[in-house]
Image: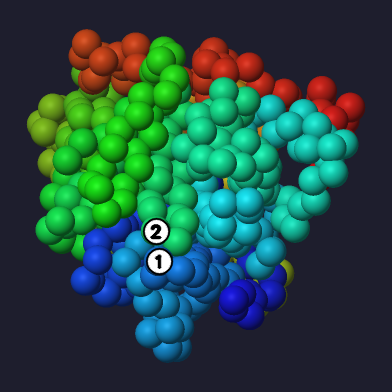
Amino acid sequence: MVGRPTRCLKTIDLHDKPREECGVFGIYAPGHDLAGLTYYGLYALQHRGQESAGIAVADGSRVQLYKGMGLVSEVFSGNQLSNLKGHVAIGHVRYSTTGSSHPVNAQPLLFRYAGGMLGLAHNGNLTNVTELRSQLLNTGSVFQSSTDSEVIVNIIARFAQNNLVDGLIKSMIDVRGSYSLVIITENKLLTLRDPHGFRPLCVGALGDGYVVASESCALDTVGAMFIRDVQPGEILVIDENGLESIQVLKPRKRAHCIFEYIYFARPDSVLDGFNVYRTRQQMGRALAAEYKVEADIVIPVPDSGTAAARGFAEASGIPFEEGLMKNRYIGRTFIQPSQDMRDLGVRLKLNPVREVLDGKRVVMVDDSIVRGTTSHKIVAMLRDCGVREVHMCLSSPPITHSCYYGIDTSNEQELIAAQKTPDQIRQCINADGLHYLSLEGLLNIFGAARDNFCTACFNGNYPVEVVKPRDAGKYNLE
Ligand code: SF4
């Protein structure tokens, strides 16, 4: 079942950040209210995608699905959950990185193949999807959606005639790029992670059952106990026999997305051994070590800059203050009443506290600048409040390259750091100082694990070969 689209009005983007990818959740726990727990799990992962949400539940003989456009609370605003009964479930929240924002692209995707029903939810982005899609089309496959996830489903179905796990193993050999997947059949929950481990995925225990999720915060929310991260190249099969691990592909050089720590993931999550909040705090400390400045207060751009601003304040000895208040009831986009209202958008989201700011020299800590479309408005708001100096500090290095592994970072022409020097950017946003955390400073935070991360958006070192847009025409990209 697909819910009716709830958003058709024109919206404007209120923040200048890379866009999250998706969040996945899966649970095998007979005797529990799985639709309800999956709903809670998706709620905890809502920050990873706000365009669509869906839940599939299996009861041993069939798989039922409900999905639609909008937030989790919008899609499941009626009695949909009460109709979804069973002992295994998967869920998905989506922001489209491939495939347009359309109900048909909402996930989980549900198919019938030779072995029965198969539902799939995907976080990531395949880098050889156009090549695979062409091969499949040429051999008679048909597609309902424009997502790369449906390409994976087709490959799995093709290889899984007799044994689903065999199909998954063969699929992992064919597909390249980033994928953390949860899969449901009538009786089983399966999950797998690409051999580089781009996107996070962890598993926990709930009584005699198991829960898998993009982030550990979703395990906490449903009362599950974190067991471990799913290993790169690993498949987990969860059913009445318990949990079976199959290390399908030898893990390649790890390439966990470092931006999960800078911005995407929730601060209370632990990803591949590192707590996100503590990591951000250390980014702030590293920033303070690199950028010595005389100032009166340190303020965050809430909420993503908060932990780093605290770290900066602790390391520099400059007092931490909250100089910008965030409207917590506003999403990443909002409906644009008229063009005239566009410039007020940032004020709708952030409002300065004049009493904190007036007459001060301010260090303002944010996580990143993508296009530079909102930073100058925030600096202008501070100056309107009597701020004497604004020093903008960013807990990421300059974003100079696009991401092809499931994050929408904009194309390189739109990335301000790909087009301008830091001093030119400082002038554009009218700040007195601008400092980006160095890549070296960022990696040092992870100690011995410093080589386990993808940093391609900062240095162009792509761990998996990518097809850039200028090469894409020959593949007839959608
Ligand atoms: Fe993450 Fe950047 Fe790598 Fe994309 S290119 S996976 S955003 S670190």
Q: Indicate the quadrant where residue 309 lies.
A: top left
Residues under numbered marks 2 and 1 in contact, where contact means CB atoms less than 8 Å apart: yes
**Image quarter (top left, top right, bottom left or bottom right) of the C terminus:** top right
**Position of residue 60 in the picture relative to residue 410 (left or right):** left
Q: CA distance from mark 2 to mark 1?
A: 5 Å
- Using the image as rendered, state which of residue 296 and residue 23 is in the foreground: 23
- Using the image as rendered, state which of residue 472 and residue 432 is in the foreground: 472
**Position of residue 72 in the picture relative to residue 135 (left or right):** left
Residue at the spot of label 1: 60
- Residue 51 position within the rendered picture, expressed as x and y whole percent measured from the top left: 56, 63
The three-letter amino acid code for the residue at tag 2 is: Asn
The image shows residue 406, relative to residue 451, as above or below, that is below
Q: Residues within 10 Å of mark 2 (few under 14, many from 20)?
A: many
Which structural element holds mark 2? loop
Numbered badge on residue 226: none
Ligand 1 closer than 8 Å to the CB at disc 2?
no
**Image quarter (top left, top right, bottom left or bottom right) of the N terminus:** bottom right
Q: Residues within 10 Å of mark 1 (few under 14, many from 20)?
A: few
- Residue 426 position within the rendered picture, expressed as x and y whole percent measured from the top left: 50, 30
Question: Who comes first in sequence, dot 2 or dot 1?
Answer: 1
- Residue 353 position within the rendered picture, expressed as x and y whole percent measured from the top left: 29, 61
The three-letter amino acid code for the residue at tag 1 is: Gly
Which structural element holds mark 1? loop
Let me know if residue 266 appears in the view. Answer: no
The image shows residue 453, relative to residue 391, as above or below, that is above
Residue at the spot of label 2: 187
Residue at 46%, 50% (x, y): give it.
Answer: 183
- Using the image as rendered, state which of residue 380 and residue 215 is in the foreground: 215
The image shows residue 373, relative to residue 221, as above or below, that is above
Residue at 52%, 16% (x, y): give it.
Answer: 463
